[in-house]
Image (spheres, helix red, strand yellow):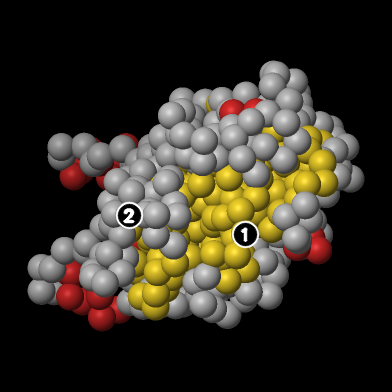
Amino acid sequence: MKPLGLWGKKMIPGTRRGCGLLLWLTLALAAGCASAPPQPAFKPPVYPPPPAEPRFIYERTLIYNDDVEEFTRAMRFKQYALGASRKLKGLVKPFDVAVRKGRVYVSDSVQRTVFLFDIPGRRFVEIGTEKPGLLVKPLGLDTAPNGDLYVSDITARRIMVYDANGRFLRAIGSKEQLRRPSDVALNRDGSRLYVVDTGGVDSQEHHVLVYDTASGELLDTIGRRGSQPGEFNLPVQLTIGRDDMLYVVDGGNFRVQVFGPGGDYRFSFGSVGRMPGQFARPKGIAADPDGRLYVVDTAFGNFQIFDPEGRLLLFIGERGQSGLPGKYMLPAGIDVDEDGRIYVVDQFFRKVDVFRPIGLAADEGHAAYIPLE
């Protein structure tokens, strides 16, 4: 794909290498210590690249607990004076991401947990590791207006609900209702929960279930297996956009289907192909505050940005084996926060890349980038 200019791991510092002292101090003092030329400073990529007007810039990558945890003086004393080691914890097989007010939740299907990268609070928390809120295979995530976290557990076949700090509250759904729940989304006031049931090749249960979040009652079922408008073939993820419109990634039909707040079919966009605006393996989806849609394509190694009517605006990223910013092998989940920052998960490189709108300064917003000591 060539970048479209239609839409008007951490910063890596430069390094210097010094040479060792010569064997004899007198010779070292005479010769001095030469330095190799400094390496060029890391220049974060922008999208679209020049000469087009840039819209987004790479900001940072989240992988480990020390990407957000503050290393305090007390922690340094404990490590160096008492010989204690600093425990490093990170992503193994992340799948989805959900962000609210600088709190970045990432599901990890192998470690059977959801990690909270609390950027403003400088905390790293594991969620779903204890009963009764024990997770088996967490996949899709979403947050409610009050901060509650909803997690689809595809193996336990239910939706787990936690408060913003990870305290288990309740479960929604059952094995009788859900076959393979792969993602969740809440409407704008948090009263309705939409659950994608991916079904399977031997199942006709390819649909979206609608629950009342307060009572857990099943209210409606949207769609059935098929290829006609309003039907699904292996749907994978979904999001709520502007005016409570529902957008569902219909993976096996290579499209995104759009439904009204009442579940009525409106339109679809996308088709199978290798051109911009088409899909090869669509997966994650998110909507920003202005209604734009962000759709991850695992085969392309990127995510494409569409307007609310499904017209392509831009794409970001490409396939690559380096793991550098914007290089992906297995991109999956995606989310956009209140300030327009984009968070995209790559399963292969075990990371979450963060992109910032050009008009937003690094020290602005809930997830302001303030380097740790």
Residue ID for mark 1: 220
**Image spot of residue 107 (x, y percent):** 41, 54
Distance Cα–Cα, label 2 vs label 1: 21 Å
Q: Amino acid at mark 2?
A: Ala
**Image spot of residue 248 (x, y percent):** 66, 45
Of the residues under marks 2 and 1, which one precedes in the sequence?
Answer: 2
Q: Secondary structure at mark 1?
A: strand
Q: Secondary structure at mark 2?
A: loop
Residue 10 appears in the picture as rendered:
no
Q: Residue at x 26, y 72 (%)?
A: 132
**Image spot of residue 359 (x, y percent):** 79, 59
Viewer-closest of 138 and 65 = 138
Q: Residue at x 75, y 36 (%)?
A: 229
Q: Residue at x 13, y 68 (%)?
A: 84
Viewer-closest of 293 and 33 = 293
Q: How many marks?
A: 2
The quarter of the image holding the C terminus is bottom left
How packed mark 1 is, by other alpha carbons closer than 10 Å (few <14, some 14-19, many 20 or more), is: some
Residue 85 appears in the picture as rendered:
yes
**Image spot of residue 288 (x, y percent):** 73, 57
The quarter of the image holding the N terminus is top right
In the rendered image, the vertical position of residue 179 relative to residue 39, given as above or below? below
Q: Nearer the viewer, mark 2 or mark 1?
A: 1
Q: Which mark is residue 251?
A: none
Q: Residue at x 81, y 31 (%)?
A: 4
Residue ID for mark 2: 156
How packed mark 2 is, by other alpha carbons closer than 10 Å (few <14, some 14-19, many 20 or more), is: many
Q: Residue furthest top?
A: 274
Q: Amino acid at mark 1?
A: Asp
